[in-house]
Image (cartoon, grey):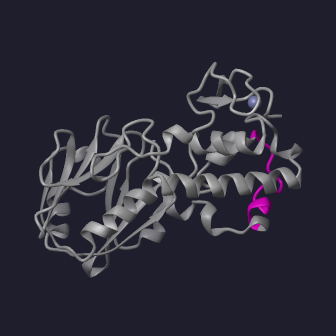
């Protein structure tokens, strides 16, 4: 699933390519991705609008159109966006632009979502979202853990706790900080949370620089894979030697998600 660095990459690349461009035609190939709006209504409201801004909140992409309408694009598990000259095979919704570019919303399992709203801030998914990790200070990050009594890894992935962190970057940050993914947050020391903050920030920033991790269907908007996978330290490295201590990396299902960690380095 695309996480903060992947959606940030898509945002930056879309900004370079479709900002101030007009959407001249829309084709809805699979109406299941449109939420709370009928295809006819969607087409009627979006065709002819100009892209005025593109921003991100957590893993959600927000496209501001003229007339103060907002396209809310959530790629979820298996969605991706391709901008090019042609229609893609797995496109569910196609946006054709005035400069002859075509934006394809592709989705293999049709779990992604597109919405059209006037007040994006009022959407429950946005309203309940935790702070942006790259926008909060160390003290604020540490403060989030006050009174929390749960395993650290599922908490990091909880979008209402912290926005944008998912399965991959939660594991990588915990390895970097030397914290076992099942550690109870009650037993974490301030200096450990401080280290986790540094790890999370530097990993997210580096992953954005490398244009994300293509561990699944995620692609940059030109269809190329992201470049961060070779830099992953534990994710999908079961039985391979830990980069720090050579102990074989372990995999365990934690709160339903496959989790990789070093049993020696992470306490
Ligand atoms: Zn190790």
When asked about the image quadrant of residue 20, the answer is bottom left
Q: Does residue 4 show up? A: no
Can you say whether 43 is above or below 27 in the image? below
User: Is 144 colored magenta in this rendering?
Assistant: yes
Taking 73 as reference, is 153 left or right? right
Residue at (82, 39) in percent of width and height: 184
Image coords of residue 211 (percent x, y): 44, 53
Q: Which residues are magenta?
A: 140-151
Split into quadrants, the picture shows ligand 1 in the one at top right
Can you say whether 139 is above or below 255 in the image? below
Residue at (79, 33) in percent of width and height: 265
* Foreground residue among 169 and 78: 169
Residue at (31, 79) in percent of width and height: 68
Q: Quadrant of the N terminus?
A: top left
Residue at (66, 47) in percent of width and height: 156
* Foreground residue among 249 and 181: 249
User: Is 103 colored magenta in this rendering?
Assistant: no
Q: Find the residue positioned furthest to the bottom.
A: 67
Taking 123 as reference, is 155 left or right? right
* Foreground residue among 113 and 223: 223
Image coords of residue 136 (percent x, y): 67, 68
Taking 101 as reference, is 267 left or right? right
Q: Does residue 183 show up? A: yes
């Amino acid at each position: 699933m695309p996480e903060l660095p992947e959606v940030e990459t898509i945002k930056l690349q879309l900004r370079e390519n479709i900002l101030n461009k007009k959407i001249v035609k829309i084709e809805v190939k699979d109406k299941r991705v449109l939420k709370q709006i009928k295809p006819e209504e969607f087409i009627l409201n979006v065709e002819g609008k100009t892209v005025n801004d593109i921003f991100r909140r957590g893993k959600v992409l927000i496209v501001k159109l003229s007339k103060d309408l907002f396209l809310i694009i959530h790629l979820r598990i298996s969605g991706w966006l391709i901008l090019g000259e042609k229609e893609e095979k797995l496109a569910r919704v196609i946006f054709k632009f005035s400069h002859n570019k075509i934006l394809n919303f592709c989705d293999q399992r049709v779990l992604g979502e597109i919405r059209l709203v006037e007040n994006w801030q009022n959407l429950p998914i946005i309203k309940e979202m935790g702070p942006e990790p790259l926008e909060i200070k160390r003290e604020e990050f540490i403060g989030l853990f006050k009174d929390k009594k749960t395993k650290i890894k599922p908490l990091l992935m909880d979008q209402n706790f912290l926005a944008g962190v998912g399965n991959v970057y939660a594991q990588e940050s915990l390895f970097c900080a030397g914290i076992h993914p099942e550690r109870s947050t009650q037993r974490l020391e301030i200096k450990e949370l401080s280290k986790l903050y540094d790890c999370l920030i530097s990993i997210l920033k580096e992953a954005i620089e490398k244009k994300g991790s293509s561990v699944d269907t995620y692609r940059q908007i030109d269809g190329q894979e992201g470049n961060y996978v070779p830099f992953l330290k534990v994710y999908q490295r079961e039985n391979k030697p830990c980069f720090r201590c050579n102990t074989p990396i372990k995999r365990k299902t934690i709160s339903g998600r496959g989790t990789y960690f070093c049993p020696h380095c992470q306490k």
